[in-house]
Structures are given as C-alpha cells and as structure tokens.
Image: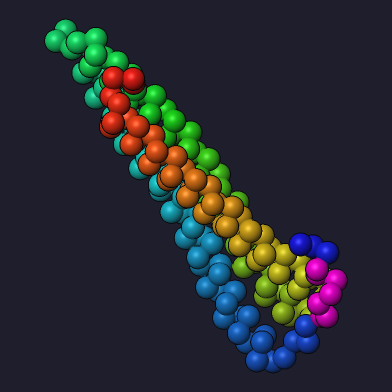
C-alpha cells in the first residue's frame, strides 16, 4: 500500500490542526504508557495464575488415588497450559509492537507540529499507520486463536476418549 502514498498531496497545516494535534499528543502519550503498564501487569497476573495451576496439578498428580485415565486428562491440561503460555507470550509481543508504534507517534507529533517539516509529519503518520496495522494483525491473530480454541474445545468435549 506504500505505492499509494505518492498520490496524496502534502497536507497544509492550519493553526486549528496544530491545536488539535497538541491535544492529541498528550492523550496518545498517556494511552501508550498505560498500554505498556497494562501489558506488564497482565504478564505478571498470568504468570502467577499459571504457577498456581501448575502447582495444583503437580499436587494432584502426586496423589496415589489417581487413575491412568485421570493422569491422561491432567497431562492434557498441562499441555493446554503450556500452549496457552506460548499464545499469551505471542500476544504480549503483539501488544508491545502496537504500543511501541503508538508511543513513537505520541512522542513525534509535538516536534512535528512545532517544526512544520514535511518529513517529520510523514514519519509521525507512518508510526500512527503502523500502530493500526499492528493492531489489525493482532486482532486477526486473536480471532484465529479464538476459533481454533472453539474447535479444539468442541472436539475435546465430544470425544474425551481421544485425548
């Protein structure tokens, strides 16, 4: 889509636009920092949750009253947790790139408005465009995972003897 960029003529910046962009830059900066912090908090919560589940599964599997079929089910749950950990780490990576592009836009818009240099505006808008590109890719990835999980859980519920 970069070849369409040459068809658009440069934007003429008006005083009203500069005021709006100054307001936007503060909010964009705030939400980019908030996104980074929420990403870190989510990682910590998920790590604590998975650690507790793994400990519980280890304690249950050490029990002498567990059958081989139940052990097989516990192994399935363990692998499901491992896969969910990998998916979660990929999701955090996706969130990082979305928030990084957002942060670069927020940091660059004010200097671009002050300098009135076309190349700075183009760089800032490239960061904003990348933010939405990464966000779109992330949403498509999450929808794919949702439907894959839906299919897997349906198969697991209908045919428990195969797992």
Work out whether residue 135 or residue 154 is closer to the camera in this orientation and state it. 154
Task: Write the residue at 53% across / 47% down.
Answer: 141
Work out whether residue 89 or residue 150 is closer to the camera in this orientation and state it. 150
Examine the rendering and report whether any part of residue 158 can be seen: yes
Q: Which residues are magenta?
A: 4-10
Q: Is residue 1 left or right of residue 43?
A: right
- Indicate the position of residue 4 as horizontal and vertical percent values: 80, 68
Q: Is residue 60 left or right of residue 24?
A: left
Number of numbered discs: 0
Split into 4 quadrants, where in the image is the C terminus? top left
From this viewpoint, which residue is outermost toward the front?
Answer: 158
- Indicate the position of residue 46 as horizontal and vertical percent values: 37, 40
Relative to 115, does residue 78 appear above or below in the rendering? above
Q: Is residue 5 magenta?
A: yes
Task: Write the residue at 44% across / 40% down.
Answer: 148
Task: Write the residue at 57% across / 57% down.
Answer: 135
Split into 4 quadrants, where in the image is the N terminus? bottom right
- Indicate the position of residue 13 as horizontal and vertical percent values: 75, 87
Q: Is residue 81 left or right of residue 19?
A: left
From this viewpoint, which residue is outermost toward the left?
Answer: 65
Quadrant position of residue 93:
top right
Relative to 134, does residue 110 appear above or below in the rendering? below
Task: Write the residue at 43% across / 44% down.
Answer: 147
Quadrant position of residue 134:
bottom right
Colouring convention used in this rendered image of the protein:
rainbow
Q: Is residue 96 magenta?
A: no
From this viewpoint, which residue is outermost toward the bottom?
Answer: 15
- Indicate the position of residue 157 as horizontal and vertical percent values: 28, 32
From this viewpoint, which residue is outermost toward the right?
Answer: 6
Examine the rendering and report whether any part of residue 63 can be seen: no
């Amino acid at each position: 889509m970069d070849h369409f960029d040459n068809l658009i003529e440069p934007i003429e910046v008006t005083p009203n636009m500069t005021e709006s962009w100054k307001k936007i830059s503060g909010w964009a900066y705030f939400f980019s920092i908030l996104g980074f912090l929420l990403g870190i908090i989510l990682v910590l919560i998920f790590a604590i949750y998975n650690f507790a589940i793994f400990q519980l599964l280890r304690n249950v599997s050490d029990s002498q009253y567990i059958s081989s079929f139940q052990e097989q089910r516990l192994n399935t749950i363990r692998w499901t947790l491992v896969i969910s950990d990998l998916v979660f780490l990929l999701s955090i990576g996706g969130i990082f790139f979305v928030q990084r592009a957002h942060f670069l836009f927020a940091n660059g818009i004010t200097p671009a408005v002050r300098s009135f240099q076309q190349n700075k505006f183009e760089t800032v808008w490239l960061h904003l465009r990348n933010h939405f590109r990464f966000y779109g890719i992330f949403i498509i990835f999450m929808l794919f995972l949702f439907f894959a999980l839906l299919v897997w859980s349906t198969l697991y519920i209908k045919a428990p003897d195969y797992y």
